[in-house]
Amino acid sequence: MKILKVLNNPIFSTIQDAGRYGFENQGVPNSGAGDILSYRLGNHLLGNGDVPSVEVIHGNLEVEFYSECLIAITGSDMTPKINSVPVKMWESIQIYEGDILTFSTQKNGLKAYLSIKGGFKIKEIMKSSSTHSNFDVGGNKLAINDFLYWDHEIVNFQNKKLNICPDYYKFSQLEVSEKKLDVIKGPEYNNLSSASKKKLFDSEFKVSNRMGRTGVVLDGIKIEFSKNFTDIISDGTCKGVMQVPKDGKLYVLMEDSQRIGGYPRILSFTSQSLNYFSQLMSGDSLMFNLITIEEAHIKAKEMEDNFFRDNLSENLNMNEFILTHDNEKFTIKSDKNNNKNIIIDGKPIKLEF
């Protein structure tokens, strides 16, 4: 069934899931959500697995819902509003037929995620519904008058929120000396000149305007190699890897990048730091913090424990009381911020005044 209609032409909004894996040997990019943590947390709030969501880049998206459903909005704060009323992120939101959801411009990051209970119904190609930004493979690039479909039915409205969520706002406000992202050594790291090895971790880099879902060019010091180093034979790559072309700049491969390349791979973001990097915008600065792969594994485990273990709670913005009528008891919940939202024994009721 139709669940929503796109009412405008967004800057760049696509269907994404956890990515397209298992076809790298055929040169197929992984695609998938850029900020995989925010994507997963949105679905976690709704009790979903890795189902299709909408990735909103730069904001400017307006949709109308065709049925009751449950959604969550995560990632960058793009001032989401329902029927012109601001709504909270990082918690489940009850939607009614005819509701209009809007995203404005980004405040503290590049990407936001719109997830729906049960996931959007999108045809899979090579075991994924993700959209590749350049090729006509999978998913959908949203445009005005597009419809998205859904085959789920809400049996019980669960009003959940995250106790801990990624703090992109604070990260975006940090001084550049504090905005250090973890990296590990790449295969050609040891071929760098001694001076470049030192400068890599003492220098500030800036996200250039050459950026997209295939890659991001960083402005900063010129990376140089030892005199006896020659070009490599084309070899495997993946998202998060930093290559150095002939111009000496750092080129960060992103989710839609190729799976093989011929430029030296000197560093790679950890899975945790790549989520934060994917939220940086043109002009944002950053520095690198070198860790071992063993430390990266420990931090990845800590991230899973922090965000996905016992991180959901009932939303305390709901009033709850018991109503007895004809000797029958009903559990009534009402939203403290919107007295039109009433839930009776788990079933949402929309009041019209």
Image (cartoon, rainbow, N blue to C red):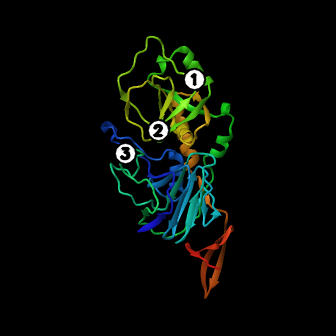
What residue is shown at x 68% (from left), y 41% (from top)?
173
What residue is shown at x 46% (from left), y 66% (from top)?
3
Q: Nearer the viewer, residue 220 or 94?
A: 220
Dot 3 or dot 2: first in sequence order is 3
Say what secondary structure mark 2 lies in: loop
- In the rendered image, residue 203, in percent from the top left (x then y), is placed at 62, 25
Measured along the vertical axis of the image, is residue 291 above or below residue 38?
Answer: above
What residue is shown at x 43% (from left), y 61% (from top)?
146
Dot 2 or dot 1: first in sequence order is 1
Q: Which residue is mark 2?
A: 254
- The CA span between labels 3 and 1 is 33 Å
- The CA span between labels 3 and 2 is 15 Å
Q: Which residue is mark 3?
A: 135
Residue contact at pointers 2 and 1, CB within 8 angstroms: no
Residue contact at pointers 3 and 2, CB within 8 angstroms: no
**Residue type at tag 1:** Ile
Callout 2: few (<14), some (14-19), or many (20+) C-alpha neighbours within 10 Å? Answer: many
Measured along the vertical axis of the image, is residue 160 above or below residue 331?
Answer: above
The reply to whether residue 216 is in sight is: yes
Dot 3 or dot 1: first in sequence order is 3
**Residue type at tag 3:** Phe
Q: Which residue is mark 1?
A: 221
- In the rendered image, residue 282, in percent from the top left (x then y), is placed at 58, 39
The reply to whether residue 167 is in sight is: no
Residue contact at pointers 3 and 1, CB within 8 angstroms: no
**Residue type at tag 2:** Met
